[in-house]
Amino acid sequence: MPLYITQNIGPKIGLANGSTGFVVGFQFPERTVFKETSVMGATMKIATVLPEIVYVSVDQAKLKSRFPGVPEIYLANTLPIPPYTVAAQVKIKFSRSFTINVTQIPISPSFAATAHKLQGITSNSIFIPYQRACKTVHIALCTSFSCENIKEAFLVSEAHR
C-alpha cells in the first residue's frame, strides 16, 4: 500500500512528514490474537492490537547501509516505524479536565492527495481533474518532474470540460 509518513520521526534518514513509501511488513507482539472475519466472501485474519513495528520501504531513505534490526528479507531502504503515543489535555466546564492518550502509527494511505499535501513532494506524474482546478493548481503543477507530465495534465483537464 502506498503511504505518507505523517510525522518527523527521523528526518536525517528520510523519515519526515510527507515522505512516501510502501508497507512491506509487520511485527506483532508475541501471543497476538488474530480474529477471523469474512468480508464479501473473503476470509481474513485481523490483529486485535497494533503492530510493534511497521516495516516501510521509504523512497527517500538516506541510508549508507541496512538499518539495524531490519530483517534481511526486506530491501535495504526499509525502515522500521513504531507506534507512538500522544497525550492531549482536554478542559471542560467548571475547571475540570482529563487526559486522552492516543497511540497510532504515523502513516497515512497515499493513493491520492490534496494540492496542499503535495507541497515539497516530487512526483513522476500528476492528474488534475478540470472540475477541481482552482487557486492551488500551481502547487500540484510544481510537483511534476517534467514539463511533459504537466502538459499531459492540461490535456487531460481539457478533455474533461
Image (cartoon, rainbow, N blue to C red):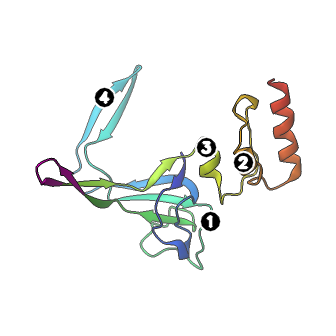
Task: Indicate yes or no whether the magenta region holds residue 131.
Answer: no
Q: Which residue is disc 3 drawn over?
A: 114
Q: CA distance from mark 1 to mark 2?
A: 19 Å
User: Do the CB atoms of the residues marked 3 and 1 lie less than 8 Å apart?
Assistant: no
Q: Which tag, 4 or 1, sits closer to the chain's start? A: 4
Q: Which residue is disc 4 drawn over?
A: 37
Q: Amino acid at mark 2?
A: Ala
Compared to residue 85, the image places residue 40 above or below, namely: above
Q: Which residue is disc 2 drawn over?
A: 140
Q: From the image, which quarter does the C terminus lie in? A: top right
Question: Which residue is found at the position 71% from the left and 42% from the top?
Answer: 135
Q: Amino acid at mark 4?
A: Thr
Left or right of 142: which side holds 49? left
The one of 116 and 123 positioned closer to us in this rendering:
116
Q: CA distance from mark 2 to mark 4?
A: 40 Å
Q: CA distance from mark 3 to mark 2?
A: 8 Å
